[in-house]
Image: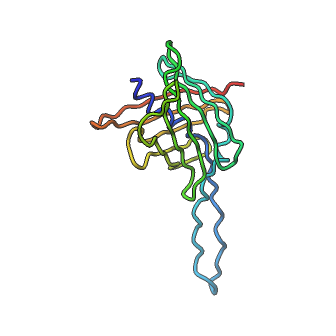
Amino acid sequence: MKTTIKLAIGSFTIVMLASLITPALAGTPTATTTPAAKEAPPALAKVTDLQFLAGHWEGSVQTAKIEQTCSLADPAVMVCMFRLMSEKGTEMLEFYTLRDTPAGVEERIRFFSPDLKEEPGDGVTMKLASSSPTSVVFENPTGTYPKRSTLTRTTDDAFHSHIELVDRQGKASTIDADWKKTK
């Protein structure tokens, strides 16, 4: 279970509120002029759309306590630290970024032991797949562990995260957590 929490927690720490703005149609054609205007694609979400994540958050997953702190000093890159704690103390750390890319917001996650030994591998990269005023969904385009992370904002100072995982044997599982912003 610790491995499940360890590999998946980061995908929901990031993953929060992005509001997409749908541009207005280019114009209304007349019968004697140009053909009908096509609808423009929606604008890509930006890290600044996720600025509510800046600050300190606390929550729990089963009996483990979780916390994260995010900084938005650069409007194109949010830097975050996540910690998972049990009754024994800190079990693992994650450092991750949410950053603007030409394809949209991307989350890059690296895992560390409490003494900052980096976990093997290249970490996890999640892409913002969809967003609304109250929900964001990040998906892993190259793997299934985690497969998807959905964050639902419940109030200005709270959100719920739901992470979907599929292990190498094809067994599906989920991790749910409720987060509260601390002052």
Where's the N terminus, which quadrant?
A: top left
Q: For the C terminus, which image quadrant?
A: top right
Relative placement, left or right, of 78 versus 2 is: right
Q: Quadrant of residue 29?
A: bottom right
| Residue at far top of view | 87
Residue, x 63% and y 26% (percent of image)? 180
Relative placement, left or right, of 123 versus 23 is: left
Q: Residue furthest left?
A: 169
The spot of residue 78 in percent (x, y) is 64, 42
Q: Which one is in front, 129 or 144?
A: 144
Residue placed most toward the observer, 171 or 42: 171
Rendered location of residue 102, percent (x, y): 57, 59
Q: How is the image coloured?
A: rainbow
Q: Residue visible at 40% across and 27% down? A: 3
Q: Residue at x 48, y 16 (%)?
A: 63
Left or right position of 177 against 28: left
Relative horizontal placement of residue 176, taking residue 19 as reference (left or right): left
How many numbered discs?
0
Give the x, y percent position of residue 116.
52, 29
Going by the picture, which residue comes out furthest to the bottom? 32
Point 60% across, 29% down: residue: 68
**In terms of image quadrants, where is residue 39?**
bottom right
Q: Position of residue 106 (x, y in %)?
A: 54, 48
